[in-house]
Image (tube, rainbow, N blue to C red):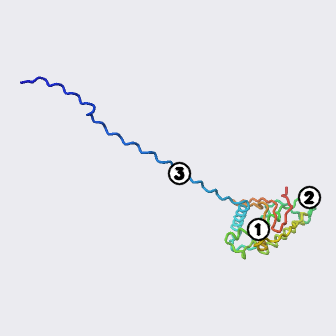
Amino acid sequence: MDSGPSPPEDPPSSSSSQVPPSSPPPPPPPPPPPPPCPSPPSHQLSRYESQKRRDWNTFLQYLKNHKPPLTLPRCSGAHVIEFLKYLDQFGKTKVHSSDCSYFGHPTPPAPCSCPLRQAWGSLDALIGRLRAAYEENDGKPETNPFGTRAVRTYLREVRESQAKARGIPYEKKKRKRQPPAAGDAPGDDAGEASTASASVVGVSSEAGATVTTEVVAEDAGGDTTKSSSAS
């Protein structure tokens, strides 16, 4: 027997519907990197040390270009004097010859054809720096070519000849003697070739070019050059 149509089924309630699983939360952002540590300031060489390094590199280049090439262990005082004479061509100090009418004149009223040379004070300060650089580069004091008697004699002759030619004496400064402090050995600064009051004979050699500048210098004994660069 037909019982008749069945009642319609109720729609499924929302509570019974399937809910998709929720996505996991995003990971937290990484912490910011720590600030970089400040780098220590780069060590800057003093003016004297920079000049000494340039002079030393120039002398090594001179030995390399020498005919025949020279090595530092074979370098002697004679080669150092040859190097100083080579630098004369870049000098800026007028040195009058004995037959010049301005010989011995400190302030000549007119120009002349006498050659330009490196001033004695410039050469003396240069030798002081090269002498120190030689020993700083593992050279032994007893084999230092910049401290030989021949080099000292040459510098003395240049000093005397330039003083006569230019009429400018190199006077010694009188210094008051002070008693040494306790614990100080006498003669600590003996044997120093020179102390330059400014950079002297700045020489650089690149691609065969050589440039020099010279200023007034003072030696360890207090001698000063009263010279000025020639115009």
Separation of disc 1 and disc 3 at Cα? Answer: 50 Å
At 31% from the left edge and 38% from the top edge, which residue is drawn? 20
Within 10 Å of the Cα at label 3, are there few (<14), some (14-19), or many (20+) other Cα atoms? few
Q: Mark 1 points at which residue?
A: 128
- Upstream in sequence: badge 2 or badge 1: 2
Amino acid residing under circle 1: Gly
Mark 2 is on which residue type? Pro
* SS of the residue under disc 2: loop
Q: Is mark 3 on a helix, strand or loop?
A: loop
Q: In which quarter of the image is the C terminus?
A: bottom right
83 to 15, vertically: above or below? below
Tag shown at residue 81:
none
- Residue at figure coordinates x 85%, y 70% from the top left: 177
SS of the residue at dot 1? helix
Q: Which is more toward the observer, 140 or 30?
A: 30
- Picture quarter containing residue 208? bottom right
Look at the picture and state if 37 lies above or below 146.
above
**Residue 139: x percent and y percent?**
69, 72
